[in-house]
Amino acid sequence: MGIISRFKDIMAANINALLDKAEDPEKMIDQYLRDLNNDLGKVKTEAASVMADEKAAERKLNDLNAEIAKMDDYARKAVAAGDDEGARQFLTKKGTLTQQQQAAAQNYELAKVNAQKMREMSTKLESDIKALEEKKATLKAKLAVAETQKKMNSVGSSGKGAGATIDAFNKMEDKVNHMLDEADAMAELNQAPVDDIGSLTAKYDAVSGSSAVDDELAALKAEMGQTSQE
């Protein structure tokens, strides 16, 4: 039986140790799950046959034991009845059955060991499959978290780039404002200086002009015989 010959390998397999060495644990888990489910299918198929053999070997051994006990009982009865020949026949048959019983006992022990191995392998494989299913779920959850963190890091990096762009824009705006301030200052400097003396002269010239007109008006009114209405 091929699956029984793999008993030691299956029982010695350390899934966690194998996964620790794997470059891609998720792919390895999928591969191990396929292998384990394949082995489990074989184990269940052969287990049914091995356990049936165990039951048949046990039944044959029990039947032989019963026949041996029966021959021994008949031999005793023959001896009690003084039938030595009959007792010899019963004892001879008992001897033949005893030899068969020894072979049947060996077959039963082998069948029992194989059946126990099949049970142990089945339990081991089911346990490994369950552990791998749980590890796979945990691994997928970790991968999802990693992907989310990766996206967040990417967004964070983009945010830093946008911040740098905003800083550059602000610097350019400051530069433009400074250039405008310089232009305004230059325009103010280019204006003609205020001539204070000229302004005062024009002011008093205007006053003098107005006074002369008033004097001329008063003279005209006097000539025409009019008096000023105060």
Image (cartoon, grey):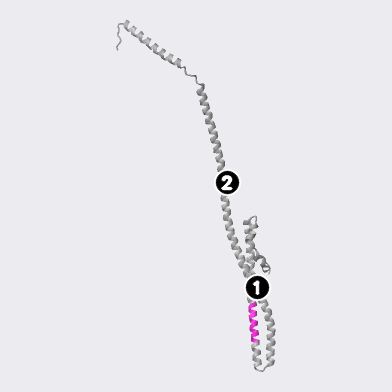
- Label 1 close to label 2 by CB (< 8 Å): no
Q: Vertical placement of 148 versus 121: above or below?
A: above
Instruction: Decide which of tag 1 and tag 2 comes sooner along the chain.
Output: 1
Residue 134: quarter of image: bottom right
Q: Mark 2 points at which residue?
A: 154
Vertical side of 11 occupied by 223: above or below? above
The residue depicted at 65 percent of the width and 90 percent of the height is 76
The spot of residue 5 in percent (x, y) is 68, 68
Neighbours of disc 1 within 10 Å: few (<14), some (14-19), many (20+): some
Give me the C-alpha separation between circle 1 and circle 2: 60 Å
Q: Quadrant of the C terminus?
A: top left
Q: Which residue lies furthest to the front in this view?
A: 197
Between 133 and 169, the one nearer to me in the picture: 169
Query: Which residue appears farthest toward the bottom when viewing the image?
Result: 82
Mark 2 belongs to which amino acid? Ser
Magenta segment range?
57-71
Instruction: Describe residue 207's horizontal placement relative to residue 229 as left or right.
Output: right
